[in-house]
Amino acid sequence: MRTILAVALIASPAFGEPRFERIDTPLDDHVYSGGWEHFVGGGVAVFDCNDDRLPELFAAGGETPAALFLNEGGMQFAKGDLPELTGVTGAYPLHLDDDAEIDLYVMRVGPDLALLGDGDCAFRDGTEEIGLPQTDQWTTAFTAWFEPGEDRPTLAVGHYVDRSDPDGPFEVCDANAILRPGPNGYEAEELTPGFCPLSMLAAKDWRREPTLRISNDRHYYVRGGAEQMWDIGERRFLTEADGWDGPQLWGMGIAARDLTGDGRAEVMLTSMGDQLLQIAGRDGYKAAPFEIGTYAQRPFTGGDGRPSTGWHAEFGDVNNDRLDDLFIAKGNVDQMPGMAMDDPNNLLMQEEDGTFVEHGESAGIATLDRARGAALSDLDFDGRLDLVVVNRRAGMELYRNVTEETGNWIAIDLVQPGPNPGAVGAEVRVNGRLQEVTVGGGHAGGDAGPLHWGLGDAGSARVEITWPDGTQAGPLRLRLNGLHRLVRE
């Protein structure tokens, strides 16, 4: 299938089969709970808030208070200090104010919050300080980007069903919002029509233009809606005349990664039933052929033959063989009888021919709880991507990647002075393989950690950077098997 993705085959040695080890930590006791307003959400944010290169975790709790878990090394975590925050559906780490400390945008059923970092993993409620508008809406999606000349990010906030509408819940999707930084705080403008989003991602689209992608839940918009693309520069929705004809999905999560090497990111959209991989080309997106192996439409173990329900999706090279793999969190919304109840998470490993093969059970991650948010991230700084999963009405799961015979790797963390210290919007190519620094996507949570590449048996790393303003840097030759913090001069 590599011919489908238009990439030439390159011979490489065999690398280890993926293996994960379940780790017992305080995460096991944290549960995402609640009634129908918490059927969705349940995200986890991954970020380093004390600059020790070991990322912390912020987990949504729904009716349970949200929790901060401090990384103590060796895959051990301890509860951190937070104000009691309930109604939390998810969170995304980013820089919301003008200092160098990482902050959190906290999504809630009710008014959202800004938790501003004070260093050493201490946070304060900075909602009023940054002028974040307060509404009683149900936030289920988020993304952010930096406009030229602005010292704070522009925020896109996705609102689900309008809880105040007596005619709901069906066909009463709430309005979304664009929050723009102004002299007296953030100023809100409605983004309509809204079709009940469960994920948003601001990133370059197939045209290589910055675009806001919105993945919507057909269960509530019922008809008349679709997946949306909003041009950030022109401030308008794309149409068929632009080459965009959005599919209708029970959209829940977004993952993006350039799988073909052409500089355009393919996009994974999770849903109830089929999970849709869109292949990017010069003229737009095309649905990947069924044979590619990413549709993951039914459980692969557990004995339940009904269709699957996909939530968080994320690309990452689990065995560092230079081929990006795909994790999908799975779980019934609650008790939907037409969908699988025993619905294991997927670990789809990419093969040399571009197809994906299920390894979830043999890798040790095929649990049957109702998964929601998740993250693939190197939590113990050993060069292998570990896994954390948030479950609805069940404890979180933490897995150490113990795969043997992995390939070489490199991790890159970009830093620039002034506004946008995390270089959101930058692009990095390592040995020709592109990743973009983004905030958003997944389901209800994201990772602000370094970008990670598996390099297989490559003997060197050639790194090229395009900073957010278009300035080029490199090529640089960097050592393998380590983290590089690249600071813009």
Image (spheres, rainbow, N blue to C red):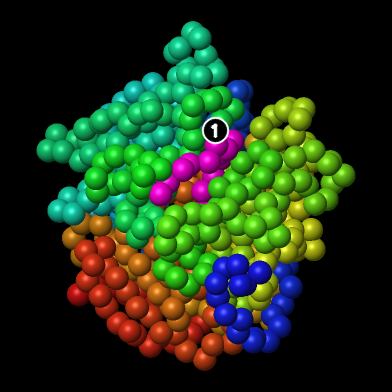
Q: Main secondary structure of the magenta part?
A: loop
Q: Looking at numbered disc 1 in the image, what kind of residue is underneath it? A: Asp
Q: Secondary structure at mark 1?
A: loop
**Taking 198 as reference, is 303 left or right?**
right
The residue labelled by disc 1 is: 217
Residue 337: x and y, percent? 77, 27
- Residue at far front of view: 241
Residue 257: x and y, percent? 49, 62
Residue 315: quadrant of the picture: bottom right
318, above or below 284, in the image: below
**Between residues 455 and 204, which one lies in front from this camera angle?**
204
**Between residues 368 and 347, which one lies in front from this camera angle?**
347
Residue 262: x and y, percent? 45, 70
Residue at (42, 57) in percent of width and height: 283
Question: Range of the magenta residues?
Answer: 243-256
Residue 98: x and y, percent? 21, 51
